[in-house]
């Protein structure tokens, strides 16, 4: 019996290059979306990630189908942005737990939007990893707040009410990743003029 993979041309798998560029950008966005990077630097991080992805894509995608490449690039861009935004909430959903914490310090971000960042500590005195971010000055130093924290400090803490807005975001990220995979493979298929 003849193997169905034998009919495939090696160039049909060149869409994996585009998929690899998007995957590396998404991994970098996942790191930027964690508590390893201060919240106000996420915009700069996504800009650098996308610029590097565009440069890598420019060199890696010669001869690809333009329509499929454009669709894959747009969906890949959305995927990278969603990974950046949903890394923290996904970690909190999968590994987080509620804790009563106390506000230890408040700082206002220096950007155009007034955002407040709160350093928190559990009532036992243990510092909570990352910072709680709010659009308004809602809490005072010493005030007690119920938050959801990731035990290893990999995600910025969030209020329980904020976390419900991101319910099952990891599932949406997984589905979008699979769609991106299919689109990248379609973009890498040889053109009809190259076959023969």
Image (cartoon, rainbow, N blue to C red):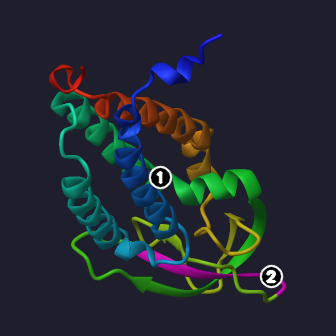
Q: Residues within 10 Å of mark 2 (few under 14, many from 20)?
A: few
Residue 56 x %, y % = 26, 60
Query: Residue 123 — which label?
Result: 2
Predominant secondary structure in magenta?
strand
The percent position of residue 166, horizontal first and vertical second, equals 56, 44
Q: Which marked residue is nearer to the observer: mark 1 or mark 2?
A: 1
Q: Quadrant of the C terminus?
A: top left
Dot 1 surroundings within 10 Å: few (below 14), some, or many (20 or more)?
Answer: many
**Where's residue 165, x and y in %?**
54, 43
Q: Quadrant of residue 147?
A: bottom right
Question: Dot 1 corresponds to which residue?
Answer: 83
Q: Which residues are magenta?
A: 116-124
Q: Is residue 139 or residue 154 the one in the foreground?
A: 154
Depth check: 30 or 131 in front?
30
Of all residues shown, which one is farthest toward the right? 124
Which quadrant does the N terminus fall into?
top right
Q: Is residue 110 left or right of residue 165?
A: left
Is residue 32 positioned above or below 50 on the image?
below
Tag 2, which secondary structure?
loop
- Label placed on residue 137: none
Q: Would residue 64 be found to the left or right of residue 78 on screen?
A: left
Residue 6 or residue 110, whichever sits in front: 6
State the residue at coordinates (54%, 78%). Answer: 36
State the residue at coordinates (45%, 36%).
181
Residue 134 at x, y = what percent?
46, 66
Marks 1/2: CA distance? Answer: 32 Å
Based on the picture, tell me whether residue 100 belongs to the magenta stretch. no
At x 24% / y 36%, what residue is drawn?
Answer: 69
Image quarter for residue 170? top right
């Amino acid at each position: 019996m003849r193997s169905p993979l034998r009919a495939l041309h090696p160039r049909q798998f060149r869409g994996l290059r585009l998929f690899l560029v998007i995957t590396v950008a998404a991994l970098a966005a996942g790191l930027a979306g964690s508590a390893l990077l201060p919240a106000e630097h996420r915009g700069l991080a996504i800009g650098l990630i996308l610029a590097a992805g565009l440069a890598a894509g420019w060199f890696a995608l010669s001869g690809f189908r333009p329509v499929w490449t454009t669709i894959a690039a747009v969906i890949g861009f959305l995927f990278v942005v969603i990974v950046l935004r949903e890394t923290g909430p996904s970690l909190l959903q999968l590994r987080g737990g509620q804790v009563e914490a106390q506000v230890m310090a408040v700082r206002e971000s220096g950007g155009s939007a007034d955002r407040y960042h709160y350093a928190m500590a559990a009532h036992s005195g243990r510092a909570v990893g990352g910072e709680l971010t709010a659009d308004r000055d809602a809490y005072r130093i010493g005030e007690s707040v119920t938050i959801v924290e990731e035990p290893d400090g990999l995600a910025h803490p969030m209020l329980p009410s904020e976390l419900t807005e991101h319910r099952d975001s990891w599932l949406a990220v997984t589905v979008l990743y699979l769609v991106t995979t299919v689109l990248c493979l379609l973009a890498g298929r040889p053109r009809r003029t190259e076959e023969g």
